[in-house]
Image: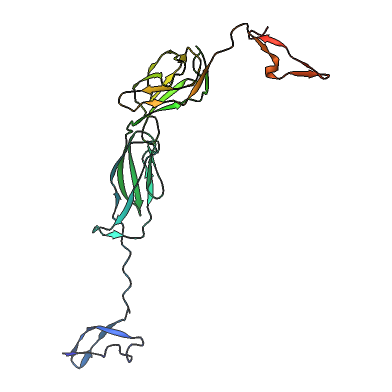
């Protein structure tokens, strides 16, 4: 029995460079010798390892509460391998379980839309991470929501109806809130009396006063609204004027005199159209 060996990378027996892997033992059998040497082609430099696989996604923060509609919170996401190591340069797809409650941008910025609970998901290479978001409005302020009048008439309902809202810090009326709001005069140059329904409960955070009126004329009136522990709200100033008494003549020239053939003419009408 003998050993067969060749120089590594032999150019004699192998036209291409080889590295011997196995040396086969040769046997002498009655004058017949069998021997073999086995080699394999050199592979050169080792190939690069495959890219890491995303095993999980972590969203930060994983829970948040927004207390105003249109309030926002920025979420971030990290891709992790099976060992929990961060994988860089991953793009995430963001989604909301209910866009009627909260929306999320392509960069993870979440905005509150309505009260409720919603799940925000970040996805990378088929792996998901989530955050739970609660939208729960907190009432912080009392404001005049609608007060477009600049003038009102004595003993006539103020129009359009005065509305007062209880709002969150961003300025949205608080949905579902019921609170009694009371209206009174503020600046009152004529000493007029405010009448009508002066205490109204809010519906979804808004109180509507449909029949408020003041019984004396004067310029620069204001109204003051109060509710619970909120700071009082004061309206913009408006004037209260006397209406034209029935039967009083009104000159047509107040609406523009007519001139015919160089002669100016005017007619008088009372407020009943006579």
Which residue is rendered at x = 68% and y = 18% of the image? 255
Q: Is residue 125 above or below residue 2?
A: above
The quadrant of the picture occupied by the C terminus is top right
Quadrant of residue 179 within the rendered picture: top left
Tell me residue 34's x, y (percent): 23, 88
Does residue 35 sit above or below 182 in this rendering?
below
Q: Which residue is drawn at the image coordinates 27% and 88% (left, top)?
A: 8
Q: Residue at x 36, y 33 (%)?
A: 168
Q: Assign the N terminus to one quadrant of the image.
A: bottom left
Front in this rendered view, residue 148 or 85: 148
Colour setting: rainbow
Residue 56 % position (x, y):
28, 53
Is residue 240 visible in the rendered image? The answer is yes
Q: Nearer the viewer, residue 11 or 167?
A: 167
Taking the spot 67% from the left edge, 17% from the top edge, the residue there is: 254
**Of all residues shown, which one is farthest toward the left?**
1
**Residue 211 visible:** no
Q: Quadrant of residue 52?
A: bottom left
* In the displayed structure image, the side of residue 56 where residue 210 appears, left or right: right
Q: Position of residue 265 (x, y in %)?
A: 76, 15
Residue lying at the far bottom in this picture: please name it. 31
Q: Residue 25's x, y, as percent?
A: 19, 86
Q: Which quarter of the figure has residue 100?
A: top left
Q: How many marks?
A: 0
């Amino acid at each position: 029995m003998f050993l067969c060996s060749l120089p590594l990378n032999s150019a004699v027996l192998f036209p291409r460079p080889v590295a011997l892997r196995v040396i086969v033992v040769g046997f002498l059998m009655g004058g017949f010798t069998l021997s073999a040497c086995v080699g394999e082609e050199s592979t050169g430099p080792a190939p690069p390892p495959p890219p890491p696989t995303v095993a999980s996604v972590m969203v930060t923060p994983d829970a948040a509460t927004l207390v105003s509609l249109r309030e926002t919170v920025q979420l971030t996401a990290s891709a992790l391998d099976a060992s929990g190591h961060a994988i860089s340069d991953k793009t995430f797809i963001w989604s909301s379980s209910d866009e009627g409650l909260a929306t999320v941008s392509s960069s993870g910025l979440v905005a509150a839309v309505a009260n409720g609970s919603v799940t925000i998901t970040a996805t990378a290479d088929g792996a998901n991470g989530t955050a739970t978001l609660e939208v729960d409005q907190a009432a912080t302020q009392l404001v005049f929501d609608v007060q477009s009048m600049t003038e009102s008439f004595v003993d006539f309902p103020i129009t359009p109806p005065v509305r007062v809202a209880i709002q969150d810090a961003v300025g949205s009326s608080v949905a579902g809130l019921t609170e009694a709001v009371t209206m009174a005069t503020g600046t009152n140059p004529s000493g007029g009396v405010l009448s009508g329904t002066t205490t109204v409960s809010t519906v979804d955070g808004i109180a509507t006063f449909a029949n408020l009126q003041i019984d004396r004329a004067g310029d620069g009136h204001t109204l003051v609204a109060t509710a619970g522990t909120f700071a009082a709200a004061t309206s913009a100033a408006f004037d209260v004027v006397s209406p034209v008494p029935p039967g009083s003549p009104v000159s047509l020239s107040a609406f523009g005199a007519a001139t015919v053939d160089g002669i100016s003419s005017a007619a008088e009408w009372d407020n009943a159209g006579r």
